[in-house]
Amino acid sequence: MNFEQARFNMVEQQIRTWEVFDHEVLDLLMSVRREEFVPAAWRNLAFADVEIPIGCGQVMLRPVIEAKVLQALKVCKTDSVLEIGAGSGYFAALLAARAEWVRSVDIEPELARLAADNLERYGVQNVGVKEADGAEGLPCRAPYDVIVYSGAISAVPASVLPQLKVGGRLFAFVGDAPVMTARRITCVAEGRYRTEDLFETVVPVLRNAPPVDSFRF
């Protein structure tokens, strides 16, 4: 399989057609080798418009969803990032290419090991992977410039918002199937937040996500 041609086709035929026009995001998707984070059995589908199973009932999200999240977050080189749901480590690698450092947590020991191994093998040095229940954030390393949930939650926990710096952005897939909302929350001032619903989709639910004590707008 010609991975470079497949990568180019992914960007031009999938990503751009879903209104991802940020050149830095497009360049990032061309430079970070997605196939290196895909389980061997699924490697030929690394650039297909499908979710790829990685074990423990979780998946690598479709490339276009990953791209739209990156575009929404506008990560920059001075940012500290918390990723909740480490998965295969691929999205952490994308975040790390834009951020100062990334802390990625996963409640599943198998996935935490998978992400850590893939990131180490790929040579990513500014990501730390931790086995932990991050559904309500990771206060010990707060505050963050960016918090991103890689799986769906019923509601944004109220305890997570104070972990954002002023100007910080949180991204989450909120709601229940068959329709979930991709939501960006920005801390506009101490204790004040702006919410924007960006698009609708369906992704696997984050294990142990708390359904109560949600943040109200």
Image (cartoon, grey):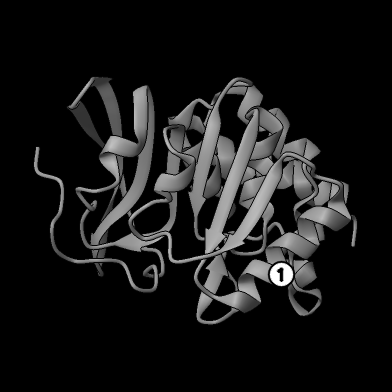
As drawn, 45 above or below 167:
below
Give the residue type at disc 1.
Answer: Leu
Q: Residue furthest front?
A: 140
Residue at 9%, 37% in the rendered image: 217
Q: Which of 62 and 89 lies nearest the eye of the viewer?
A: 89
State the residue lying farthest toward the left.
216
In this rendering, the answer to whether 31 lies above or below 104 is: above
Can residue 54 be seen in the rendering of this structure?
A: no
Element under disc 1: helix
Q: Please name whichever residue, 54 or 25, is drawn nearer the observer in this view of the structure.
A: 54
On the rendered structure, is 186 left or right of 147? left
Numbered label tally: 1
Q: Position of residue 45 (x, y in %)?
A: 72, 67
- The quadrant of the picture occupied by the N terminus is bottom right
Is residue 82 placed above or below 121 in the rendered structure? above
Question: To which residue does mark 1 refer?
Answer: 114
| Label 1: few (<14), some (14–19) or many (≥20) C-alpha neighbours in 10 Å | many
Note whether residue 190 is visible. Answer: yes
User: How far from the left and from the top, in percent, is residue 205?
Assistant: 36, 69
Q: Quadrant of residue 3?
A: bottom right
Q: Residue 115 in the image: x percent, y percent?
A: 69, 62
Percent coordinates x, y for residue 84 in the rendering:
47, 55
Residue at 68%, 53% (x, y): give it: 90
Q: Nearer the viewer, residue 5 or 76?
A: 76
Please identify the quarter of the rendering in which residue 108 is found: bottom right
156 left or right of 123? Answer: left
Using the rendered view, name the quadrant where residue 120 is placed. bottom right
